[in-house]
Image (tube, rainbow, N blue to C red):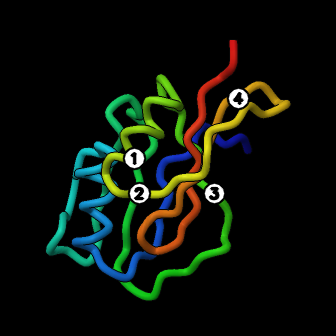
Amino acid sequence: MRLKRISAITLRVSGMARAVAFYGDILGFEVLYGGKDSSFSSLQASDAKDVILNLEEGVAHTGWGRIIFHVEDVDECWQYLRSKGLNPSDPRDAEWGERYFHLSDPDGHELSFAQPLQ
């Protein structure tokens, strides 16, 4: 057996309206199914045609790991998120060849925004 790809990642969120506003309105994900008034929603980043982010309303769990998003410009993304009133960690260069920063979503799930160093 050989796995072909990751189809979806599901996060448990404590409030769907707040989560859809964060991932949809702030991060720019497109809602494919559900939405702010639903108990289950599926969203997709504009350039990620395969992987879907599912949000399931319930008791949120943190400390599980991290989702890493590649962006065009880490510093521009960081400034944008700051302008939305969020407090991401400062961008830094990593020894493995990426510039990145971290941010927690409204339920405490850790997100990383990165771009390869050239």
Image height of 63 relative to 45, above or below: below
Give whichever of discs 2 and 3 has the lower sequence position.
Answer: 3
Q: Could you tell me which secondary element the residue under label 1 belongs to?
A: helix
**Mark linked to residue 86:** 2
The amino acid on which the numbered mark 2 sits, given as a three-letter code, is Leu
Give whichever of discs 4 and 1 has the lower sequence position.
Answer: 1
The amino acid on which the numbered mark 3 sits, given as a three-letter code, is Arg
> How many angstroms separate mark 2 from mark 3 (CA)?
18 Å
Residue 93: % across, % down: 73, 31
At 35% across and 57% down in the image, what residue appears?
Answer: 85
Q: Which one is in front, 84 or 114?
A: 84
Q: In this figure, what is the number of numbered marks?
A: 4
**Label 3 neighbourhood size at 10 Å, few (<14), some (14-19), many (20+)?**
some
> How many angstroms separate mark 4 from mark 1 (CA)?
19 Å
Q: Which residue in the structure is indicated by mark 4?
A: 98
Q: In which quarter of the image is the C terminus?
A: top right
Give whichever of discs 4 and 2 has the lower sequence position.
Answer: 2
At 32% across and 67% down in the image, what residue appears?
Answer: 19
Give whichever of discs 1 and 3 has the lower sequence position.
Answer: 3
> How many angstroms separate mark 4 from mark 2 (CA)?
22 Å
Image height of 102 relative to 76, above or below: below
Q: Which residue in the structure is indicated by mark 3?
A: 66
Tell whether 65 sits left or right of 61: right
Q: Could you tell me which secondary element the residue under label 3 belongs to?
A: strand
**Label 1 neighbourhood size at 10 Å, few (<14), some (14-19), many (20+)?**
some
Residue 101: % across, % down: 61, 44
Give whichever of discs 2 and 1 has the lower sequence position.
Answer: 1
Question: Nearer the viewer's eye, disc 1 or disc 3?
Answer: 1
The amino acid on which the numbered mark 1 sits, given as a three-letter code, is Leu
Q: Could you tell me which secondary element the residue under label 4 belongs to?
A: strand
